[in-house]
Amino acid sequence: MDGTALLATGRFSSLRPGSGLPPGWRPLTFPKISRHTRYLLVEDQGVTVVKAESDASASALIRQVDIDPARHPVLRWRWKITALLPGSDIHRKDGDDYPARLYITFAYDAGHMSLGRRLRYQAARLIHGDIPAAALNYVWARRAPPGTVTPNAYTDFTRMIVVESGPTHVGQWREEQRNVREDFQRAFGFPPPRITGVAIMTDSDDTGGRATAYYGDIAFLPLTYEKTPH
């Protein structure tokens, strides 16, 4: 594969285990949540990856980016969880926890937002601070079937997309691929603006449980590579 065509937002495999947070990535914490998830670089099966450990906690690792989804719509990543999270429920606030999530945030695009949605977004920013105007949240769910697309239990500025579900592949590395441009169009009903951020998150604050996940390399590619092998 032509390396110039690939935008590696998370090339964790090139780093040393135990060398701190990946360069360009920073912790993302949330108001009113005092317990934070622990992220560290570890070696798994001979490859450096990010390990996330959550104990009734929530926080993310985020990297700011500027990516045109029309040019690089294909998102690839790999992840692994050690167990499902009891109580996780995609439709309930008290179940809005996942052993593994991958967030994609998008720029504010007033041209595709109704007046009502713009007003709700402005109100949400007053309450919650600098939140994305739109986000896709790829998750490993407990029961919701893969392919499920639904608003987040807390905010309709985020759409949840179930990629993995249930116990079948627990403990196994899973390689995923999504067309972000198509997912955004299906979730929000209009073309995606520029991608502004990529985040990984393992959380268990709503359910009060524990979760462990591993995240491998993350990259965006042109559509021409959508069908190529990893």
Image (cartoon, helix red, strand yellow):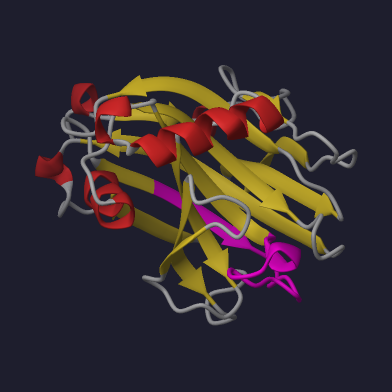
| Nearer to me, 123 or 45 | 123
| Nearer to me, 129 or 17 | 129
Main SS of the magenta part reads loop
Q: What are the residue bounds of the magenta stretch?
A: 77-97
- Does 161 sit above or below residue 107? below
Let me know if residue 81 is in the magenta part: yes
Task: Say if residue 48 shows up in the picture.
Answer: no
- Does 168 sit above or below residue 103? below
Image quarter hosting the N terminus: top left
Taking the spot 87% from the left edge, 54% from the top edge, the residue there is 55
45 displayed left or right of 117: right
Taking the spot 50% from the left edge, 51% from the top edge, the residue there is 156
- Does 24 sit above or below residue 43? above
Taking the spot 58% from the left edge, 59% from the top edge, the residue there is 80
Q: Position of residue 41 (x, y in %)?
A: 68, 35
Query: Which residue appears farthest toward the right when viewing the image?
Result: 34
Dividing the picture into quarters, in which one does residue 5 lie?
top left
| Nearer to me, 126 or 50 | 126
Taking the spot 29% from the left edge, 53% from the top edge, the residue there is 183
Number of numbered markers:
0
Task: Say if residue 186 shows up in the picture.
Answer: yes
Q: Position of residue 13 (x, y in %)?
A: 51, 35
Q: Position of residue 161 (x, y in %)?
A: 43, 61
Let me know if residue 70 is in the magenta part: no
225 displayed left or right of 56: left
Q: Position of residue 190 (x, y in %)?
A: 22, 44
